[in-house]
Image (cartoon, rainbow, N blue to C red):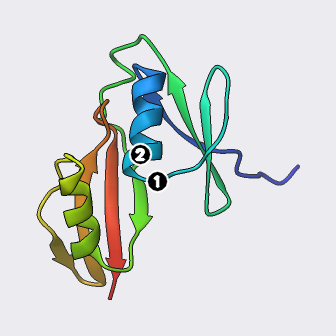
Amino acid sequence: MDSFRLDCVFYYVSDLDRASHFYTTVLDFALDSRDAVARFRVDGLLFELVPTDSHELLSGQGNARLTLEVKDIEIAVQSLRTKGVTVSDIHQVSNGWLAEMKDPDGNEIVLWQYI
């Protein structure tokens, strides 16, 4: 059997321009390439935005979440809020702190700071 290799992680979006703007402007992701989809390299991982007209695919209720590690969660949350992003309060868990937000299509994004 061939070994499996990770290709990418992707989110469905309703408007590729709007979503690309959010990820490049708000999260400072560098756009790697764009054709039918938008591609970003985030710490070596390929992250894609895939446009769709299906409202079922845009539910934002999936099991996967994009989780971004930050050095200082308080500074990260404040920075996002100054950009107009709604971010949850910071929650402490057993091994760190987290805060949650959503992209314009409701895809969940978690900010994470390890203890």
Residue that badge 1 annotates? 28
Q: Is residue 115 above or below residue 9?
A: below
- Mark count: 2
Q: x, y (%) of residue 110?
A: 32, 58
x and y percentages locating residue 31 in the rendered image: 60, 42
- Given residues 87 and 18, the one toward you in this image is 18
- Residue 107 versus residue 28 in the image, above or below: above
Tell me which amino acid carries mark 1: Asp
Tag 1 secondary structure? loop
Mark 2 and mark 1 in contact? Answer it, CB < 8 Å.
yes
When the figure is inspected, residue 38 is found, relative to residue 112, above or below; the finding is above
Which mark, residue 25? 2
Does 48 sit above or below residue 59? Answer: below
Q: Outermost residue toward the bottom?
A: 115
Q: Nearer the viewer, residue 70 or 84?
A: 84
**Name of the residue lying farthest toward the top:** 53
The quadrant where residue 72 appears: bottom left
Per the image, label 2 sits on a secondary structure element best described as helix
Label 2 amino acid?
Thr
How far across and down, in percent of the image, does residue 98 sit? Answer: 25, 69
